[in-house]
Image (cartoon, grey):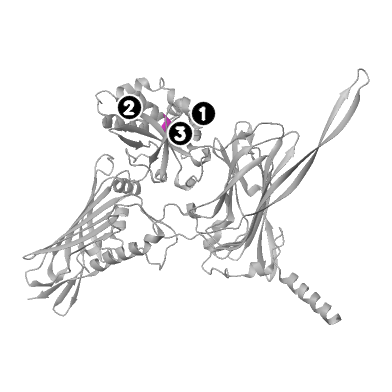
Amino acid sequence: MKKFYLGCLLVLFVFNVNAQNYKYGKVSKKEVAATSYEKDSSANAAVLYREQHIYYDYSKAEGFQVIEEVFERVKIYNKEGFDWATRNIDYYVSGNNKESISSLKGETYNIENGKLTSVKLDKDAIFEEEVNKYRERIKFTMPAVKAGSVIEFKYIRTSPFITSIDDIPLQYTIPIKKLDFQIAIPEYYTFNTHFNPRSTLRYDLTSHTGRSSYNISSVSRSGGYVQKSNATVQKLEFSKTIYEINQEEIPALKSEPYIDYLRNYAGFLKMELVFIKYPNSNIENYALTWENVAEKIQSHPEFGDQLEKSRYFEDDLDAVLVGKSGVEDKISAVLEFVKSKVKWNDYVGYYTDEGVKEAYKEGSGNSADINLMLTAMLKYAGLDANPVLISTKSNGIPVFPTRNGFNYVVASVKYNNKTTLIDATDKNALPNILPEHAQNWLGRLVRTDGSSELIELMNLGVSETKKILKIKFEDALSINGSFTQIASGYSAKEFRDEHENMSEESLIKELEEGKGNIEILDVKLKNDDSNYAEVTEIFNFKLKNGVEKISNNVYIKPMFFMAQSTNPFKADERKLPIFFKYPSTESKTVYMQIPDNYKVESLPESKMFDLNEGQGSYKFIILQSGNFIKVTSELKMNNIVYTPDDYQNLKRFYDGMVALNSEAIVLTKL
């Protein structure tokens, strides 16, 4: 029996020695010595432990407040993981109410000369900055970080905003070894819980009840010259619902080709306040419809009131509108006028920061300052203009009706039974050509009477790219040629965004990349600085390795450097949707003349094939007339979003393109 008890004690001792200690300051030498993550050797860093506890605290002076305690321990495996040593903590401000961050501390652990060492986060390395009128940020970078370091930090956030709880992160772009989340909700508050429906992960959310109590002291005084003090203590006691998630080995959220915004697919938990019911009081209903949300935003002075102001711009705009009678002319004139007058300060929001009048005067403002001003001017021009609320890609897609579901606003004009969307924050944006961050599923048009309607933000129009290649064979089958590219719609905007202020030298270097042994002789751009015209790019070139010669045969890839040579969809399976930015048509045409001392031995076969019954199509046509060959290809992507179930079809579709582009024209020497 003694041996049995001794064995049990030995097992418990070994278990305790090897058990992971997740208390702050208890980092082990084993954790620091680890060189890779066991479950994912490709991880540059991993969260060894994340603890997030949220609860409501009560004081007589402040009433209820939301307290959030966060603790994280992160392993940095290599230099590519250093970004995880820098952290931002955002907190919110609204009028006289403000969240606060306290008890922030951190430590970095390394092994030096065989010993475990640590360096504390210095207070001087913690910085505060204002993000916008409603948000501030604390930023810090952990000290002494190198490959192999383990960092940990903790802080407390105190919030007076008891009706709003931020999204609970349940997945990162690095693995999470252990997650411990808990939130305690007093009986007075009823929340609904929602997991991100776009995430592939599923979590167990458990709940149980508990109780909390607070002693509230008060002192009353009575009497005349001789005062008496009477101290009383009241006890506030209530039940609470405690929700918990305890999860281990959460895989990293990994990027895949053609995705809209990766974090939209991360695991997270949303808490939706439905109603509040205090003792001896009526129910306060917080469950909203999208119409309720639109009405509340419209009635806010930093939204609806801004649309009624016009005196500050009337004289200037009257001069701009002289001679403009058509709807499209007015839209373009007003849009370009706003762009010229007010520059975006990179802050997003649907409420103004400075107000439209001040932004107009100062020449700078946030997205609401600019686009509510734009809406007001379009109205003044006699157009049916209204603001459209949007959630940018980085803000996600709203799961349920809430004002936090939106964080951006653009203008709209309705005419000919169609709605045109307009954004003046981006110098290269045009009517129905929005900045990429605003192309996010659905928006909500808000009218002055508080009514609203859903607005499609995608499929605003097809963008076209035309590429023309003219090939001339010289002695020894070297190639001289010319290339022309004409882009319109979103394709033209992307070209302008990417090539603004680019030198000719840099442009030539970019063009030569991936085209083999090519020498680009000159480049000409047309309308690259004129938003309302197609962008044309032209260059001449010499290509030294454009053909392959074997004995008396010459093999020519018909699309040359324009070929679709690889399939971007290489994985065996796909977990995330496939997202193309916009509907597009890309046509390519090659003209070539065969040298007199050669004849055509064989040509690739012309083919056409379809993707998902019209969601996309590809055609490849090759024609010969004497010594002249013309090759045309056209890729149409009519759909923007494809589900993981569509992945295999899409992969085969691209395989077919690659195969056609890889077949050779065979010439034989006479």
Residue 368: mark in rendering? 3
Residue 212, quarter of picture: top right
x, y percent for residue 25:
72, 59
Q: Earlier in the sequence, mark 1 or mark 2?
A: 1
Residue 239, quarter of picture: top right
Chain part drawn in magenta: 366-372
Residue density around tag 3, few if under 14, some if 14–19, many if 20 or more, within 10 Å: many
Q: Is residue 368 magenta?
A: yes
Name the one closer to the observer, 535 or 415.
415
User: Magenta span: helix, strand or loop, mainly?
Assistant: helix
Q: Secondary structure at mark 2?
A: loop
Residue density around tag 1, few if under 14, some if 14–19, many if 20 or more, within 10 Å: few
Residue 300: mark in rendering? 1
Residue 481: mark in rendering? none
Residue at which label 2 appears: 383
Position of residue 288 in the picture relative to residue 27 (left or right): left
Q: Secondary structure at mark 3?
A: helix
Tell which tag, 2 or 3, sits nearer the viewer.
2
Query: Mark 1 belongs to which amino acid?
Result: His
Q: Earlier in the sequence, mark 1 or mark 3?
A: 1
Residue that lies at the very extreme toward the top in this rendered image: 224
Q: Is residue 453 above or below residue 70?
A: above
What residue is rendered at 71% in x and 32% in y?
Answer: 280
Report if residue 562 is visible in the image.
yes
Q: CA distance from mark 1 to mark 2?
A: 23 Å
Position of residue 210 in the picture relative to residue 457 (left or right): right
Query: Mark 3 belongs to which amino acid?
Result: Ala
Name the one closer to the observer, 258 or 76.
258
